[in-house]
Amino acid sequence: MAPAVTRETVPRAPLLEPGREAHVASPGEVIQRVTAWVEAGTPRLALQLGGEFAGRVELVRTGPGRVRLSWRCRKASAAGLASRVRTALAEAGLQVEGVQVDVAP
């Protein structure tokens, strides 16, 4: 009889492991990483953004079907990307409980 497959026995992609941070350069890549995170079911995702959207994004699962989004960016224009990520999360069936967007020089 084959061993049971549980959440603990399924390997996670290194990009999505808790405590790790991925570097991304474009808005499309942010959405791709968020989508992969939703599908993987890991508890936390942190992204370091470069270029025009320089800053840091962190998503944390707060319960079944619920997430919190924290966005720290250097330019106000990058805050618009946060709403695109929120929309992508909603389309994936997740309720966004809180969104924090900080713009710091």
Image (cartoon, rainbow, N blue to C red):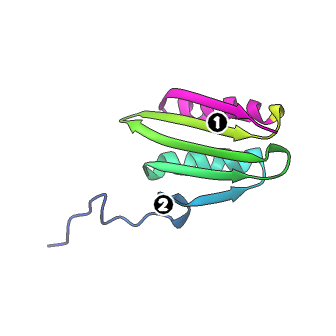
Q: Indicate the amino acid at tag 2.
A: Glu
Q: Which mark is residue 17?
A: 2
Label 1 residue SS: helix
Q: CA distance from mark 2 to mark 1?
A: 20 Å
Q: Nearer the viewer, residue 59 or 93?
A: 59
Q: Position of residue 103 (x, y in %)?
A: 75, 34
Tell me if 95 is positioned left or right of 4 in this view.
right
Q: Which mark is residue 9?
A: none
Image quarter of the N terminus: bottom left
The residue sitting at 80% across, 40% down in the picture is 74
The residue sitting at 69% across, 58% down in the picture is 23
Residue that badge 1 annotates: 85
Question: Going from the N terminus, do you reach mark 2 or mark 1 first?
Answer: 2
The residue sitting at 35% across, 35% down in the picture is 64
2 or 1: mark nearer the eye: 2
Q: Is residue 11 above or below residue 99?
A: below
- CB of mark 2 within 8 Å of CB of mark 1? no
Q: Indicate the amino acid at tag 1.
A: Val
Q: Residue furthest bottom?
A: 1
Tell me if 4 is positioned left or right of 15 in this view.
left
Q: Quadrant of residue 75?
A: top right
Q: Which residues are magenta?
A: 78-105
Q: Nearer the viewer, residue 91 or 99?
A: 99
Q: Nearer the viewer, residue 62 or 34?
A: 62
The verdict on residue 83 being magenta is yes
